[in-house]
Image (cartoon, rainbow, N blue to C red):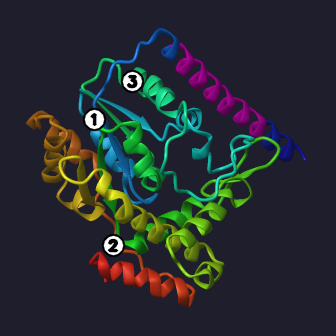
Amino acid sequence: MMKGVKWRVKAFLEYARFQRKIFAATRAAHAQEAHGRQRSVPLCFVAGCGRSGTTLLGRLLSLYPDIVYLNEPRPYWITVSKRTEIWGYCRSEEKQRSLLIEDPRPGEAARFAALFSAAGSGSRLLVEKTPENVFRLPWLHSLAPDAKLIYIVRNGYDVIRSILVEADFDIPYGFRDMNNWYGTRDKKKRLLAQTAREFGIAPQVVDSCTTSPDWAALEWVCSNRAFERHKQYFIGPGLFEVRYEELTTETWEIYSKLLGFLNLSATKDLQGEIMGYVRPGRPSAPKAELAPGIRELFESEQIRLGYL
């Protein structure tokens, strides 16, 4: 009984903490807009399927002295647009149909500029990492036309293994607990299913996804498709594609190329810190048991990317 009471108290404290962050972000955006204090700051987005190495990549970049790094600033994004609220943190009249966001709506660009310009103030570069932004590339480009994008991809079986760990428990939040990966009442999972249908994945394949590995495989496939569909918005000097396996085995070489892409200089005194931060990669995960429909789709994508 006492454990249940403590859990629920923790749930309401977590709810209050997150709501305060949204309130603070909203107030900051209004203040910035009112005073017109919006200096353009060079910006780079880091995106890719969750558990593909976006966190490692973002943290490595954050070690560079002149970079300000934002790690999944969900209150900021929810303030910019309620359409980014895919977990069930807030009550919203916005009924998302899928994870995809393509066109900006009135006020979103102004709120984005206010919040992110302030966050990057005083730095040479602002790096923002949110894996789900891979589903929002046209929208991101409309908000920040000069921004760059770093996209990271990883062996799908390793991604499945990692997602299974993150999706295996709930976290306390308000009246209802939410799954650590899929949110309240599996909101993200429902949006993922609709996203798959919008990508032309057969309904029977989506409906066959019943286990955690099935859903993780579907998310990996959809993330790759989202990037392939919309990467033209950043193609050329604004896009850097990297594999997790390269980042963890050729770390300094890849890091130096990333800095060059961002118009920053690599310094030898940083090399030891960067190399010491990366752990040797684990052996590739064994093949997960998948439903026949999603397995065929997943393995086809693995072959396309050279992982099979």
Q: Write down the residue under mark 1.
A: 63
Residue type at mark 2? Answer: Pro
Q: What x and y, as percent, mark residue 261? A: 17, 44
Residue type at mark 3? Answer: Ser
Q: What x and y, as percent, mark residue 155? A: 35, 71
* 61 relative position to 5: left or right: left
**Residue that lies at the very extreme toward the top in this rendered image:** 35
Q: Write down the residue under mark 2.
A: 283
The residue at 39%/39% (across/down) is 128
Find the distance from the CA under tag 1 to the CA under tag 2. Answer: 27 Å
Q: Which residues are magenta?
A: 10-31
**Residue that lies at the very extreme toward the bottom in this rendered image:** 292
Placement of 236 over or under 28, stated as above or below: below
By secondary structure, the bulk of the magenta-drawn segment is best described as helix
The residue at 68%/43% (across/down) is 89
Disc 3, SS: helix
Placement of 96 over or under 21, stated as above or below: below
Residue type at mark 1? Answer: Leu
Give the quarter of the figure containing the C terminus. bottom left
The residue at 32%/57% (across/down) is 231
Find the distance from the CA under tag 3 to the CA under tag 2. Answer: 41 Å
Q: Write down the residue under mark 3.
A: 117
Q: Can residue 126 be seen by looking at this rendering?
A: yes
